Amino acid sequence: MLSGVGASDKPGAVHTARQAEAVAAGAGESPTAEVIMVRVEDAEQRWGDLATVDAIVFGAPTYMGGPSAAFKTFQDATSHAIMAKGFLWHDKLAAGFTNSGARSGDKLATLIQMSLFAAQHGMIWIGLDLPPANNSSIGSESDLNRLGFWLGAGAQSNVDEGPETAPPASDLATARHLGRRVAEAAIQLARGRLPVQFELVEDAGSKWSE
């Protein structure tokens, strides 16, 4: 089961919402994945739903060098609702995506904050497994990962374009790829989530063996 936690309703978030929909669509390509989408504003009413999933993909627009205020409010709320109640998201998979008006727009700062947030919850971060793109004379704006992000999926939306045309198809395809990757990883993890016992082997050098 995969959950997508989406963006806020502030100006610009409509573009990031298209990214969220693409992530969900990619995850939904797996026949055994069930996808739910939760707006950060609704998270406090959906903690129970988020507790049931194997993976959470965090998303927010990048504003002034970081995620939106609504996303930060959501992050802070998890301190008492999730962490203080026993690390309820421990060992869930996590990933992230973000959108901004500029090509860079300091999106990396948002993805770093999301990954640190996931680490504080004991989650396992999934990055973007795409090669560099649009970085040569034969590159194209239609390449997946055209903006060159690996910690998560980045998108760029021209500030004078609505969500009908921005972000471009390549950025949405990149988000879709991330969703598919996380869903596949979550399914593999769920199938292999069996108790593992380790014993300490005393030989030339101490090491763990299964």
Image (cartoon, grey):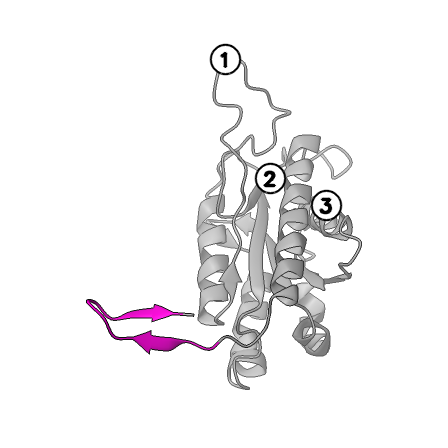
Given residues 14 and 10, the one toward you in this image is: 14
Q: Quadrant of the C terminus?
A: bottom left
Q: In percent of the image, x 53 and y 85: which residue is there? A: 86
The extreme bottom residue here reads: 85
Q: Which region of the structure is painted magenta?
A: 197-209
Q: Residues within 10 Å of mark 1 (few under 14, many from 20)?
A: few
What kind of element bears circle 1?
loop
Which is in the foreground here, disc 2 or disc 3?
3
User: Mark 1 is on which residue type?
Assistant: Ser
Query: Reading the chain from its start, which is encountered first: label 1 or label 3?
Result: 3
Q: Mark 2–mark 1 contact, CB under 8 Å?
A: no
Q: Which residue is mark 2?
A: 155
Q: Position of residue 151 (x, y in %)?
A: 48, 48
Given residues 44 and 145, the one toward you in this image is: 145
Q: Which residue is mark 1?
A: 137
What kind of element bears circle 3?
helix
Q: Is residue 6 left or right of residue 110?
A: right
Q: Position of residue 49 (x, y in %)?
A: 73, 74
The extreme top residue here reads: 137
User: Mark 2 is on which residue type?
Assistant: Ala
Q: CA distance from mark 2 to mark 3?
A: 11 Å
Q: Is residue 61 visible?
A: no
Q: Compared to 102, does 75 lie above or below?
A: below
Q: Is residue 204 visible?
A: yes
Q: Position of residue 171 (x, y in %)?
A: 64, 36
Q: In percent of the image, x 68 and y 37: which residue is there? A: 173
Q: Which residue is mark 3?
A: 22
Given residues 210 and 61, the one toward you in this image is: 210
What kind of element bears circle 2?
strand
